[in-house]
Image (cartoon, rainbow, N blue to C red):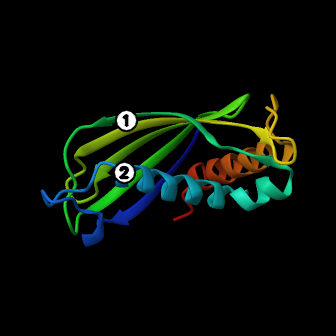
Amino acid sequence: MLKTTTYLEVQFYDLDPMNIVWHGNYIKYLEQARCEMFNKIGYSYMDMYNDGVMYPIAKMDFKYIRPARFGDKLKVVCELECVEPAINIIYTIYNAKTDEKIFKAKSMQMCIYRDTMESCYEEPVRLKEKISQYEKSIENITCMPNTL
């Protein structure tokens, strides 16, 4: 399973009147981490668009566990659960300093053809290739023998 980590810092403008992150801003954090995940594998949303497909959000589930506050460093872990016929991603947000879990979410993005807006029931070939290449590169890094 593809897994990436993104680090963010809570900004002042993300707070609500109670001085905690406004609940809607967690969606923004997920989007930042999701975009970074696709960029890390070398297949961005623009690449998808240029290949004639788009992935609008079809469903999201959230679980708020603890509030994040101004200045907190957040660690957002994205785990790609599957990509066919939809991209399903599981997210976990931690306070990066304490490693305390503060938020969990899951998103489902449906593949549609850019020009017709009709559902596509197969993942784009390039997406599948990029995921495979990224996973192999991580395996090679993780499994390199200690040469010291």
Instruction: Give the residue at x 66% y 52%.
Output: 140
Q: Percent position (x, y) of residue 27?
A: 42, 49
Q: Is residue 90 left or right of residue 143?
A: left
Regarding residue 145, the answer to whether it shows in the image is: no
Q: Is residue 51 left or right of residue 110?
A: right
Residue 83: quadrant of the picture = top right
Crowd around label 2: few <14 · some 14–19 · many ≥20 (10 Å): some
Q: Nearer the viewer, residue 86 or 57?
A: 57
Looking at the figure, which quarter contains the N terminus?
A: top right
Q: Is residue 115 left or right of residue 30?
A: right
Crowd around label 1: few <14 · some 14–19 · many ≥20 (10 Å): some
Tell me if label 2 and label 1 are in contact, CB under 8 Å: yes
- Residue named by callout 2: 26
Instruction: Give the residue at x 80% y 40%.
Output: 117
Q: How many marks?
A: 2
Q: Percent position (x, y) of residue 44?
A: 70, 59
Q: Percent position (x, y) of residue 101?
A: 26, 43
Residue 16: quadrant of the picture = bottom left
Q: Amino acid at mark 2?
A: Tyr
Instruction: Give the residue at x 20% y 66%.
Output: 70
Q: Amino acid at mark 1?
A: Phe
Instruction: Give the residue at x 55% y 52%.
Output: 34
- Residue named by callout 1: 62
> Would you place residue 64 above or below residue 50 in this image?
above
First reached walking from the N terminus: tag 2 or tag 1: 2
Q: Percent position (x, y) of residue 10?
A: 29, 65
Q: Is residue 8 left or right of residue 83?
A: left
> Would you place residue 42 above or below residue 102 in this image?
below
Residue 9: quadrant of the picture = bottom left
Regarding residue 84, the answer to whether it shows in the image is: yes
